[in-house]
Amino acid sequence: MRNLKLIVLFIIVIAGLKVPVSGHGVHVTNESTIIIADNSTGKLAKKVVDEMGVNVTVYKFGSDDAVSHELEHALTSPNKKILAVAYQGTVKEFLSKHPELSNRILVCSADENAIKSSLIRLTATRFTGGFLTPLLSGLLIGVLLGLAVGAVWMKRKMT
């Protein structure tokens, strides 16, 4: 009887410690640069991407809500770049609320030349810090940490 009470108490405690999880939907794209298209503009956008040979994925969205949801992910992902060939009204409305994303979210017409020039502009504005910034940061931290450890070690040896 005592074991049963402990088991029930254990289950109640575990159930009480569960953290509620809330999600706002599935994130469809993991790529850093995408094109938002629909059924009528998807083939043209894919053709342009293939001709240019750039690493950009074309996604066909079915609703304004799905596009809005994808645009919201650009708020938290600083590497996300989006070119909107379709759903331009939704994207322009989003950009009016979040103008800080205007260098990473572009809107262009469903014209081959417009898509090419927009893709060139979007892929050319990548951050070029690359490997140098983390390398220099690591070196600086290593030198400071090495000096501190060396000073403590030498102090201990002298006493």
Image (cartoon, helix red, strand yellow):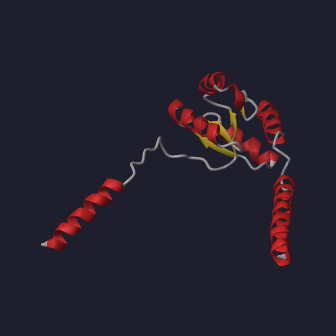
Drawn side of residue 22 relative to residue 128, left or right? left
Which image quarter: residue 116? top right
- Whether residue 39 is visible: no
Which image quarter holds the N terminus?
bottom left
* Front residue of this view, candidates 43 and 33: 33
Residue occupying the point 81% across, 69% down: 152
Q: Residue furthest left?
A: 1
Q: Position of residue 62 (x, y in %)?
A: 52, 36
| Residue toward you, 113 or 89 | 89
| Residue lying at 63% horizontally and 27% vertically, measured from the top left | 91
Numbered disc total: 0
* Residue 22 rendering spot, x and y as whole percentages: 43, 44
- Whether residue 103 appears in this view of the structure is yes
At a point 87% along the width and 54% down the height, the residue shown is: 132
Q: Quadrant of the C terminus?
A: bottom right
* Quarter of the figure with residue 125: top right
- Looking at the picture, does residue 84 appear above or below residue 130? above
Above/below status of 78 relative to 102: below
Q: Nearer the viewer, residue 76 or 108?
A: 76
Taking 153 as reference, is 138 above or below it?
above
Q: Quadrant of residue 117?
A: top right
Task: Describe residue 147's horizontal placement relative to residue 75 as left or right.
Answer: right
With 131 as the anchor, is 72 left or right in this view?
Answer: left
In x, y percent, where is residue 19? Answer: 39, 51
Task: Please identify the residue farthest to the front as the structure is shown.
Answer: 159
Image x and y of residue 141, in percent? 81, 59
